[in-house]
Amino acid sequence: MRGLVIKTTGLWYEVKSEGAIHVARLRGKFKLEEKKTTNPIAVGDWVTIEPNDQATDEWIITEIHQRENYIVRQSPRKKGHDHIMASNVDQALIFFTFKSPRTSIGFIDRVLVTLEAYRIPAFILLNKTDLYSKEELENWNQITDVYRKIGYQVDKTSLTKDPTDLTKYLEGKTTLLIGHSGTGKSSLINNEVPEVHQTTSEISSFADKGIHTTTFAEMFFIDESTGLIDTPGIKELGLAEVEPDELDHYFPEMRVHLGQCKFHDCRHTEEPNCVIKQAVENGEIAFFRYESYLSMLMGEDNRR
Ligand SMILES: Nc1nc2c(ncn2[C@@H]2O[C@H](COP(=O)(O)OP(=O)(O)OP(=O)(O)O)[C@@H](O)[C@H]2O)c(=O)[nH]1
Ligand SMILES: [Mg+2]
Ligand SMILES: [Zn+2]
């Protein structure tokens, strides 16, 4: 029977199939086949399940169907291993907050690069607008202009005080929610899927210790064709499967200039006659985006 993985805990999986939700486990051999990932199966995977024990209604996953795409990050716990956050998504919604907690532009750009590498459209959402100063909101307008020009969708909301109608972004798609702990991912689930009550909580000293309110990725449905994948907050995003010499391809505003620098292997740092640096100088490429590029390029360990 074919089914969709809607929750993973590492030990067992919830698989939705023909309207019912089954608890399933993996056959041991899958774990050996994919050595470099911490999780062989992710939320969003299509799988084949078979009944294992009729008495307990326990199922076994016998096959993983080929993924259309997936989002992978360096595992913060297991060196050299990657963690698949989710698969088969139509877009990712990246949460941005100026405070409680503070999100850096560098983090947003790392997420965007990861998404570009897998050609997954991005939607950047500023949350908690009720908390910000006039200056911060003006700053956001400038940031918004930059990202919109590049081609990303951008909007703002206050999920708990004055929620924006996000239907036009979400309708008919499977959306992965990404952001630091405490930015409001589960609050969005609770707003959009009224029968669900995801635990939400104020960030506290707990968040600094890496403890998140949401601990497992899980998919919820607004309607049959609209899914939202809640994930645990991530502190850093270690680029996985992105090589330094292809980094410029994952900045859409750089991609359009590629091949025009004097040196074909130009990294756009110290080289003469570099069209990317010229585009930064004449304002065509935002300086903060170029800074993000440099920081990812120079990162002594890009897979962090
Ligand atoms: N002031 C304010 N608080 C908000 C807003 N949206 C969410 N919150 C609060 O922020 C806190 C964190 O929200 P969550 O939805 O739990 O955050 P999360 O991203 O799911 O966090 P993790 O599960 O740890 O990754 C909760 O106390 C929410 O009530 C908002 O627009 N304004
Ligand atoms: Mg949460
Ligand atoms: Zn160059």
Image (cartoon, rainbow, N blue to C red):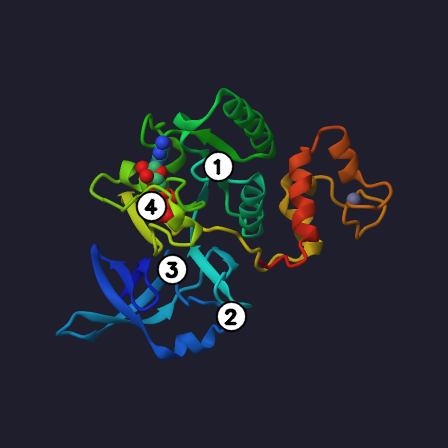
First in residue order: circle 3 vs circle 4: 3
Q: Which residue is mark 1?
A: 124
On residue 227, which mark appears? 4
Could one spot residue 188 in this view of the protein? no
Q: Residues within 10 Å of mark 4 (few under 14, many from 20)?
A: many
Mark 1–mark 4 contact, CB under 8 Å? no
| Nearer to the camera, 132 or 177 | 132
Tell me which amino acid carries mark 3: Asp
Mark 1–mark 3 contact, CB under 8 Å? no
Tell me which amino acid carries mark 4: Gly
Distance, label 3 to label 4, CA atoms, is: 13 Å
Q: Residues within 10 Å of mark 3 (few under 14, many from 20)?
A: many
- Which residue does the image show at 42% across and 68% down from the upper left? 40
| Nearer to the camera, 47 or 272 | 272
Q: Which residue is mark 2?
A: 36
Q: Secondary structure at mark 2?
A: loop
Tell me which amino acid carries mark 1: Ile
Tell me which amino acid carries mark 2: Lys
Distance, label 1 to label 3, CA atoms, is: 24 Å
Query: Within the image, what quadrant is residue 53 found in?
Result: bottom left
Distance, label 1 to label 2, CA atoms, is: 30 Å
Q: Secondary structure at mark 3?
A: loop
Give the label, 2 or 4, closer to the camera: 2
Give the label, 1 or 4, closer to the camera: 1
Q: Secondary structure at mark 4?
A: strand
User: In which quadrant will I find the N terminus?
Assistant: bottom left
First in residue order: circle 2 vs circle 3: 2
User: In which quadrant will I find the C terminus?
Assistant: bottom right
Could one spot residue 184 in this view of the protein? yes
Q: Secondary structure at mark 1?
A: strand
Q: Which residue is mark 3?
A: 45
